[in-house]
């Protein structure tokens, strides 16, 4: 019961947040200096285009009405048509988004695969040699921004070692050639994985260390079961709450923050498309991407909140 | 009592925690034996080292920053200095512990049935369905109503008393030879306290267990123990048969403890306020008798020299005191002894 | 083991509230403080220091390696890299500190007040802040900066600063809440101290450690963000040097002259490392449990 109520409350909150986001995204257009239509249309300022834009955005009406006109279009899956590329914003986003998803999934697999076992080992002997090395290493990595990592990874892997399909602009869609696709995903996935790894390792380690002080762990030990079982069965789950919470925020951050990596490697995901659109002053596309990314981040956070209540139902009760 | 070799033999057991503030000698050299089928009570104020003693007997200490010295022989096996791998073999099967705090001792994210199952399956090798059946039997045995449904419950869905019973069921799962019951009735109301203690008594005789019953409530141990150890600041200050301790105690601390045995109406774990002063800071133990600062009979000597445990008359009755109370000829046992 | 503190409390409860003798901060901590100081000094006094003009091209000294004349070498236009790094630190330092000044200036008093007053005020502000928190800050920053032209340093600071307010609010509010129930605050209330006195005399000094360590880590985050924006061309425009700019411009030239990438990257990483390290040390020094950032 408590869980259902909790989820319902979250759901209401989420709808509220999405509403705020939609207002924000809508209002972006009006931040543009001067008449939005002129700026949006740019070079393609023909009478027909202008009429279409006015219809699309309801520009000649009051701002509140404009919002609802715009919202109505959005809810019908219409984010407008770019006046720069003449492509519908929705279809551009549909092409780009799966690339982000693939990149993030790969990076998260890597990050978890390294962070979890390492944190489990570190926490068993806090301040032991392994723990000290891993903690110092992760701390150093924490201070290296992804854009520096990617610059040097490209230099080493693609330029010096000349490993094929790893450099900038080697992206090929998964349908075209999945091997090349995976190869081109190595560097971005590794780069994003490093940041996530550091985060996950540190959170899980410190949470495990405090979980291992708990009385229920001592009781589990008194059962004479193996250390491995104590770690995985008794300590990991309570500690994974913090991990999953962090992962939720972090993955949201990757959707929003993956653009540097995509930009530098010319991987045509959402982030890359966004930067491209900004440089081309393709404001409708920018607006659409901002909306989609923001809403996905909110959805992801909601999903992970939900996941946490499954791992630890007590959370819903407080 | 039998003249067999003791089941448990503790010699000069000392446990010291190395903390940021300095060394904490939580247990400072404890010696006693326990025979098969015997029950020994350990009493003392909060912080006197009862829990640490019980854990040291089992070898169940944190893995770091703790030093255990002396010797603990359990059925011929040395515990002090044994590796955790060796200890794992005897834990649960030969020696098990009922944990003091039922609110924190159960894993909040595992169904209680599974927590009992675990020992049965991994230590006794029962298969899944047998383990479940046995776990439900155990839940039933410790007096949990509708054990079948409770098997699936999470700890948070149970009251403190019910959780205490689950903790007991876990300890009993493998019918250990020695049960270390660390205040098994804290947090329970009086009727349930009696029920649980009766249950332990009965199980003890059914399963031929020996038991170390830790409590800070003398009333609890009066009728259920063969012998009593009184602890203060990590040391034994008086020990003897239950009757001796109740009727012929010589140590002023024991007297104070008896006089202050909490009334049944008090919330459990109330501090024993009747004894003036507070327990000593283990970091700054005086060189004399630790109880001296609070003792109305204390003399110069008490502050400067530590009294050792000595007997006077009965070989089973030892106490550490320079100015023991006179042997009562017509002194009666404190009223506390008659309840519980 | 969990009731360790209680057990200690039995022996001498008043010890608990008094901060115990702490370990030292360690030499590395002071090295980091010094490094941070040097960076800030350089940023403030860049135009007073005897540095070559960071914008002056010198075609007779292109892509030089480090030498006595050019400490860290020259870039593809013959500009002095050392000088550019020192001037570049101005951007990082001013964006980092400026944005956090805004974030803390608004977020911290609000957070303290909300936690201290509780009630409706707290509920409204907290709900509002959580709504903003759910909004991905990076995207908001990028979106606003790309629409709000022409860009300037002030706008960048303003946008990042405002975006950081909810984060600061959350941390400070949580810290205040945990303090509010401590004995010394309750004691002060019982003694009839005024709100103002409690806030400034009791709460503020005790929240300060959390605040400062979060401030430092926040600055590191903002500096990283500015670097990323520079890559996207959303920060200060070249030829004006910033660390992000310099690394970005060096990308295409890496295989010819690796120094033009390494030095600014090193400057940035060391700057971030000292911020993070100082923040982390302070946090464990004051024994603040890991606050999620
Ligand atoms: N892990 C530890 N580190 C440092 N000191 C400890 C640790 N565990 C226990 N102590 C100290 O040892 C002393 C004895 O504690 P113990 O828990 O054995 O008392 P107790 O007699 O069981 O009290 P209670 O009746 O409250 O359960 C206390 O002063 C406590 O502070
Ligand atoms: Mg205890």
Image: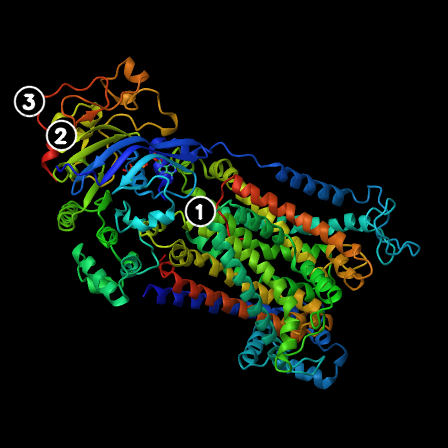
Q: Which chain hosts label 1? A: C
Label 3–label 2 contact, CB within 8 A: no
Q: Which residue in the protein does label 1 denote?
A: C117
Quarter holding ligand 1: top left
Q: Residue furthest bottom?
A: A48
The answer to whether tags 2 and 1 share a subunit is no
From the top left corner, tell me how far across and down residue B309 is, in percent: 24, 24
Please tell me which residue is depicted at 47% across the width and 33% down the height of the picture. C20
From the top left corner, tell me how far across and down residue C141 is, in percent: 64, 62
Quadrant containing the C terminus of chain B is: top left
Q: Nearer the viewer, mark 1 or mark 3?
A: 3
Question: What is the number of the mark on residue B330?
Answer: 3
In what element is the residue under mark 3?
loop
Indicate the quadrant where residue B162 lies: bottom left
Q: Residue furthest right?
A: C60
Give the vertical position of A77 relative to C23 (above or below). below
A77 vs B105, left or right, is: right
Q: Which residue in the protein does label 2 denote?
A: B246
Q: CA distance from mark 1 to mark 3?
A: 65 Å
From the top left corner, tell me how far across and down residue B227 is, in percent: 16, 34
Q: Which chain hosts label 2? A: B
The answer to whether tags 1 and 3 share a subunit is no
Is residue A290 visible in the rendered structure shown here? yes
In what element is the residue under mark 1?
helix
């Amino acid at each position: 019961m408590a869980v259902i109520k909790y989820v319902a409350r979250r759901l209401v909150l989420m709808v509220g947040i999405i509403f705020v986001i939609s207002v924000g995204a809508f209002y972006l257009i009006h931040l543009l200096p001067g008449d939005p239509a002129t700026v949006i249309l740019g070079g393609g300022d023909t009478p027909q285009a202008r009429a279409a834009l006015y219809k699309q955005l309801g520009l000649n009406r009051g701002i509140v009405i404009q919002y609802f006109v715009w919202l109505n279009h959005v809810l019908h899956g219409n984010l407008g048509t770019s006046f720069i590329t003449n492509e519908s914003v929705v279809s551009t986003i549909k092409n780009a988004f799966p690339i982000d998803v693939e990149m993030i999934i790969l990076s998260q697999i890597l990050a978890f695969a390294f962070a979890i076992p390492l944190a489990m080992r570190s926490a068993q002997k806090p301040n032991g040699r392994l723990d000290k090395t891993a903690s110092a290493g992760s701390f150093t990595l924490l201070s290296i921004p992804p854009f520096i990592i990617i610059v040097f990874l490209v230099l080493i892997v693609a330029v010096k070692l000349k490993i094929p399909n790893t450099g900038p602009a080697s992206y090929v869609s998964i349908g075209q050639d999945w091997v090349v696709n995976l190869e081109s995903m190595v560097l971005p996935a590794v780069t994003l994985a490093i940041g996530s790894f550091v985060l996950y390792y540190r959170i899980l380690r410190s949470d495990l260390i405090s979980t291992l002080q708990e009385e229920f762990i001592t009781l589990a030990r008194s059962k004479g079961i193996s250390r491995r079982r104590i770690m995985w069965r008794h300590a990991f789950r309570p500690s994974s709450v913090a991990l999953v919470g962090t992962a939720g925020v972090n993955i949201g951050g990757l959707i929003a923050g993956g653009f540097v990596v995509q930009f530098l490697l010319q991987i045509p995901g959402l982030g890359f498309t966004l930067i491209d659109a900004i440089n081309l002053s393709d404001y409708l596309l920018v607006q659409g991407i901002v909306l989609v990314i923001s809403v996905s981040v909110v959805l992801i956070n909601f999903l992970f909140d939900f996941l946490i209540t499954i791992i630890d139902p007590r959370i819903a009760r407080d | 009592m039998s003249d067999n070799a003791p089941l448990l033999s503790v010699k000069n057991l000392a446990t010291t925690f190395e903390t940021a503030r300095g060394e904490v000698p939580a247990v400072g050299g404890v010696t006693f034996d326990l025979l098969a089928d015997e029950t020994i009570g350990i009493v003392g104020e909060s912080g006197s080292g009862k829990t640490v003693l019980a854990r040291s007997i089992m070898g169940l200490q944190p893995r770091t920053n703790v030093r255990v010295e002396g010797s603990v022989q359990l059925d011929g096996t040395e515990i002090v200095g044994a590796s955790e791998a060796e200890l794992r073999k005897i834990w649960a099967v030969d020696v098990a512990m009922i944990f003091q705090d039922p609110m924190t001792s159960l894993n909040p994210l595992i169904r209680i049935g599974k927590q009992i199952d675990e020992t049965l399956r991994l230590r006794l090798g029962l298969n899944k369905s047998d383990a479940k059946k046995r776990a439900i039997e155990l839940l039933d045995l410790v007096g949990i109503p509708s054990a079948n449904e409770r098997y699936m419950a999470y700890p948070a869905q149970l009251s403190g008393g019910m959780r205490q019973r689950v903790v007991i069921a876990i300890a009993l799962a493998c019918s250990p030879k020695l049960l270390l019951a660390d205040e098994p009735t804290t947090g329970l109301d009086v009727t349930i306290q009696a029920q649980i203690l009766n249950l332990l008594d009965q199980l003890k005789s059914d399963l031929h267990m020996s038991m170390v019953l830790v409590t800070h409530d003398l009333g609890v141990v009066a009728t259920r123990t063969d012998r009593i150890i009184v602890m203060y600041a990590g040391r034994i200050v008086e020990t003897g048969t239950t009757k001796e301790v109740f009727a012929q105690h010589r140590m002023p601390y024991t007297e104070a403890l008896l006089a202050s045995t909490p009334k049944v109406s008090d919330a459990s774990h109330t501090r024993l306020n009747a004894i003036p002063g507070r327990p000593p800071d283990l970091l700054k133990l005086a060189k004399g008798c630790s109880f001296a600062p609070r003792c109305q009979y204390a003399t110069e000597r008490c502050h400067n020299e530590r009294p050792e445990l000595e007997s006077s008359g009965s070989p089973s009755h030892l106490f550490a005191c320079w100015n023991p109370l006179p042997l009562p000829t017509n002194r009666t046992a404190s009223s506390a002894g008659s309840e519980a | 083991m969990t009731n360790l503190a209680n057990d200690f409390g039995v022996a001498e409860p008043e010890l608990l509230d008094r901060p115990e003798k702490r370990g030292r901060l360690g030499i590395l901590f002071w090295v980091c403080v010094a490094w941070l100081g040097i960076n800030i000094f350089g940023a403030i006094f860049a135009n007073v220091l005897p540095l070559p003009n960071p914008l002056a091209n010198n075609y007779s000294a292109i892509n030089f390696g480090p030498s006595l004349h050019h400490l860290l070498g020259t870039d593809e236009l013959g500009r002095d890299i050392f000088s550019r790094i020192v001037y570049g630190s101005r951007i990082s330092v001013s964006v980092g500190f400026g944005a956090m000044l805004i974030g803390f200036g608004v977020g911290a008093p609000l957070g303290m007040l909300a936690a201290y007053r509780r009630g409706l005020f707290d509920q409204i502000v907290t709900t509002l802040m959580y709504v903003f928190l759910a909004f991905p800050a990076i995207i908001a920053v990028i979106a606003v900066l790309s629409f709000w032209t022409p860009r300037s340093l002030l706008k960048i600071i303003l946008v990042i600063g405002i975006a950081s307010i909810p984060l600061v609010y959350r941390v400070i509010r949580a810290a205040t809440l945990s303090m509010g129930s401590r004995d010394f605050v309750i004691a002060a209330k019982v003694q009839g101290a005024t709100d103002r006195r409690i806030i400034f005399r009791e709460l503020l000094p005790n929240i300060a450690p959390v605040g400062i360590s979060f401030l430092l880590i926040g600055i590191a985050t903002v500096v990283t963000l500015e670097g990323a924006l520079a890559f996207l061309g959303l920060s200060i425009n070249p030829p004006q040097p910033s660390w992000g700019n310099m690394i970005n411009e060096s990308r295409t030239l890496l295989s010819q002259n690796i120094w033009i990438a390494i030095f600014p990257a090193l400057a940035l990483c060391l700057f971030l490392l000292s911020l993070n390290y100082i923040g982390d040390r302070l946090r464990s020094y004051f024994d603040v449990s890991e606050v999620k950032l």
